[in-house]
Image (spheres, rainbow, N blue to C red):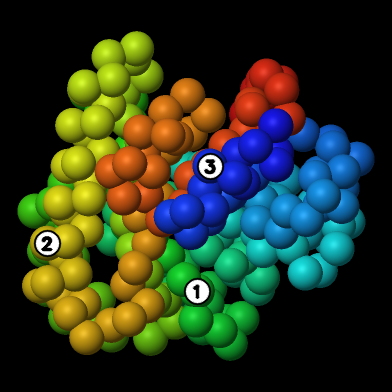
Amino acid sequence: MYQEILKQLQPTHTKLVAVSKTKPLPAIQTLYEQGQRIFGESKAQELSGKFEALPKDIEWHMIGHLQRNKVKYIAPFVALIHSVDSARLLSEINKQGEKANRVIDCLLQFHIAEEASKFGFTAESAQALLSSAGFSDMKHIRIVGVMGMATYTEEHQQIRKEFQCLRSIFEQLKNQFFADAAFFQEISMGMSGDYLLAIEEGATMVRIGSLLFGKREYQSD
């Protein structure tokens, strides 16, 4: 299945984030040996442990809801944080980036789904953040794009509409705040059930877990 997914992504150069949360080290190592280098985790301490145990050329992405008090565990090495859903979290990432003496790439997460449980900015709250003096003072983060999760539904038109919404927000922010920033280029959307729709709507990276590793093994917090 891994090679089949790569073939689907190849024409658009969409990046594959293999969602390895809750998965054991041997399963990740197996996919690594097939050539996969980008892996996504949803819990900071689990991510930190896997970083220590697995090859150092893996590019680790934080894709789950991130609590401010957990940022310190991943700040020294994380390649990309997808799930920046508040100004307070971004400020903490900047603080920990300064401590680690590095600039941390981040995506702003937007609430595009109908489900109330999803986290994220609105277009208006993101514009307010990016216009603020506080944001301009953050020298240890870099906003490289946007992320969103569609509603969990079989209604493809609704999913497509939500992906189109995220793409529109990306273009709006690009024009307003990042017109001269080549690094602002990522649209992270699409998972195992809807990644083909996401690719059609302009995703630059998709987050796929169950198609690669099998069904999730749920763990309590």
Residue labelled with disc 2: 172
User: Who is closer to the viewer here, 127 or 55?
Assistant: 55
Most distant residue in the top direction: 154
- Cα separation, mark 3 vs mark 1, equals 30 Å
Residue at image position (12%, 62%) is: 172
Residue at image position (65%, 37%) is: 4
Residue at image position (77%, 34%) is: 23
Q: Give the crowd class for mark 2: few <14, some 14-19, many >=20 residues within 10 Å.
A: some
- Tell which tag, 3 or 2, sits nearer the viewer: 3
- Tell which tag, 2 or 1, sits nearer the viewer: 2
72 relative to 129 in the view: left or right? right
Residue labelled with disc 3: 8
**Residue 174 image-quadrant placement:** bottom left
Q: Give the crowd class for mark 3: few <14, some 14-19, many >=20 residues within 10 Å.
A: some
Residue at image position (54%, 53%) is: 10
Q: Which mark is residue 104?
A: 1
Report whether residue 91 is seen.
no
**Residue 7 image-quadrant placement:** top right
Question: Where does residue 47 sit, x and y in percent of width and height?
Answer: 70, 51
User: Who is closer to the viewer here, 66 or 13?
Assistant: 13
156 relative to 133 in the view: left or right? right
Amino acid under label 3? Gln
Amino acid under label 2? Gln
